[in-house]
Image (cartoon, rainbow, N blue to C red):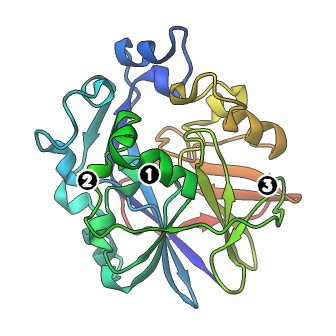
Amino acid sequence: MPTVHAISTGSVRVKEAQRRRRPGGPIRMLTDRDWTDWLPIHCWLVEHDDGLLLVDTGETARVAEPGYFPRWHPYYRLAVDFDVAPDDELGPQLRRLGVDPASIDTVVLTHLHTDHAGGLAHVPQARVLVDADEHALAVGGPGRLRGYPSNRWPAAFAPTFVDWQDAPVGPFERSAPLTPDGSVVAVPTPGHTPAHLSVLVRTDDVTYFLAGDTSDDEAVAVEGVHDGLRLGEGLDLAERLARHLGIRRDAVGHALDSDRLVVARVSGEEIRHVVRADEHRQVGRRVAWRRH
């Protein structure tokens, strides 16, 4: 059965108007004077009998280099701030777990924002899976306008597109098995980006829900008001999760102020992922899950 390790690759803070919708639309996100607390940038190592799988790759310390992000893009100038040291990056963190980055077989990207794809250079040999529509939104000049720094991807970046199937998993109408035994499965969770996905990892005791940036904390998830990036673009995923999955405490993306990353309900089974707030920066802790 799979096991899961939480990895934190530095920290990020964004404007409160991104975390929680505020009047004024995207302009408010740029002009807001209020910042969130520093939030950990998570990715996840899944150990499976068929190999090692990563969900996301975290961020690179290169974000501190002048010119790494385009100066002409207002979001990077005004609405996001990173704290990532070289030792915070994916490669050093994997080695602290005793894992050679070259041994990673598969990387699954929940989406292609920089804090999820920034560590790709550490795993150039891995097969990379991403949603085809997410990739189409992110490539080239139009992608950079949308906030995807596609010019910073590795030169050989050639992802494989997720093969979605009409196979329901809980409330999700489609899914894509990521391992031969079906214990690791991708599900579509659009919201933060139009083609965002999440990953379920099933064990004998519990199901892990590795949910990317579906939400930033419990309150905004329950209220269904999160994510200023997606104003006016369909049903908000946090609202959908709260309504259909019964989320009570949700800090699945970057949250620092909650002791639980996920509480959701899939097919009647409650999914709980416990990581104490003071452990967020302590890389390599085994993720603790329990059924209630």
Asked if disc 1 and disc 2 are in contact, CB closer than 8 Å, the reply is no
Picture quarter with the C terminus: bottom right
Residue 276 shows in this picture: no
Comparing 174 with 288, the one in front is 174
> Which amino acid does the dot numbered 3 rest on?
Phe
**Residue occupying image coordinates x 62% and y 57%:** 198
Give the labeled residue for mark 3.
172
**Mark before the other along the chain sequence, 1 or 3:** 1
Asked if disc 1 and disc 3 are in contact, CB closer than 8 Å, the reply is no
217 in relation to 175, above or below: above
Q: CA distance from mark 3 to mark 2?
A: 32 Å
Q: Where residue 112 is drawn, which disc sits there?
A: 1
For this orientation, the residue located farthest to the right is 268
Q: Where residue 152 is drawn, which disc sits there?
A: 2
Disc 1 is placed on an element classified as: loop
237 in relation to 47, above or below: above
**Whole-percent x, y for residue 167 in the image:** 82, 67
Residue 2 shows in this picture: yes
255 in relation to 151, above or below: above
Q: Which corner quadrant of the image does residue 154 belong to?
A: bottom left
Q: CA distance from mark 1 to mark 3?
A: 21 Å
**Whole-percent x, y for residue 226 in the image:** 59, 28
**Mark before the other along the chain sequence, 3 or 2:** 2
**Residue occupying image coordinates x 35% and y 12%:** 31
Comparing 107 with 81, the one in front is 107
Using residue 224 as the reference point, say whether residue 116 is left or right of it: left
**Mark before the other along the chain sequence, 1 or 2:** 1
Q: CA distance from mark 1 to mark 2?
A: 11 Å
**Residue occupying image coordinates x 24% and y 49%:** 84
